[in-house]
Image: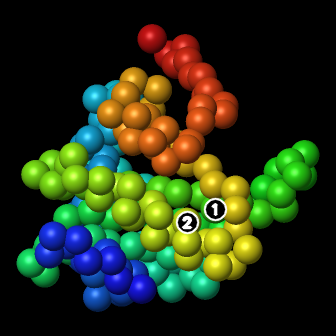
Amino acid sequence: MTILTKEIHVRAATIKDKASLLHLEQAVVEAERPYNAQIKTAAHYYDLDDLLTNQNAQVVVAEHKDAIIATGYVQIRQSKPSLTHSKHGYLGFMYVSPEFRGQALNQKVIQYLMAWAESKGIYDFYLDVYNDNQAAINAYQKLGFEPSLLEMKVNTAK
């Protein structure tokens, strides 16, 4: 499945994309650092080898002129026993290069990922977003996401 919009292609990522994905992972870390001062220098969020090869995960990239400009993944996970669904899709690694923001690329990536998961019988989706990241919250709400659970933290070492 490929989506073509204004010379931008959305496609499933492959192991050949790993170097570019590692670079974008660091862009995600830097974008999130203002929301959490405790993120380590050169932090790694994702097990890309697993995400790229696991049958219960799909990584997607958006390309423009052979350059990866956006990414995301969905991973099918076990749900908490207290929920009505036994499995859900967890969305992560949502990133769009700054010069391509505002073109609904994140929406296209998420729609691709959700369609893939739905083809496997998954209809409940979750993601994490920093409370102060209003731009991301607005983008997710346009797709029907609603706040569900607020994680709270404290550091007592101060």
Q: Residue at x 31, y 47 (%)?
A: 29
Residue 106: quarter of image: bottom left
Q: Nearer the viewer, residue 97 or 4?
A: 4
Q: Position of residue 46 (x, y in %)?
A: 44, 62
Callout 2: SS: helix
Q: Nearer the viewer, residue 5 or 89?
A: 5
Q: Residues within 10 Å of mark 1 (few under 14, many from 20)?
A: many
Amino acid marked by disc 1: Gly
Q: Residue at x 47, y 56 (%)?
A: 92
Q: Is residue 51 visible?
A: no
Q: Position of residue 134 (x, y in %)?
A: 37, 28
- Residue 137 in the figure: left or right of residue 37: right
- Residue 48 in the figure: left or right of residue 151: left
Q: Quadrant of the C terminus?
A: top left
- Residue 85 in the figure: left or right of residue 110: right
- The vertical placement of 99 against 17, above or below, is above
The tag earlier along the polypeptide, 1 or 2, is 1
Residue linked to disc 2? 114
- The vertical placement of 157 against 29, above or below, is above
Callout 1: SS: strand
Q: Residues within 10 Å of mark 2 (few under 14, many from 20)?
A: many
Q: Residue at x 61, y 50 (%)?
A: 126
Residue linked to disc 1? 89
Q: Residue at x 13, y 81 (%)?
A: 66
The reply to whether callout 1 and callout 2 are in contact (CB within 8 Å) is yes
- The vertical placement of 158 against 148, above or below, is above
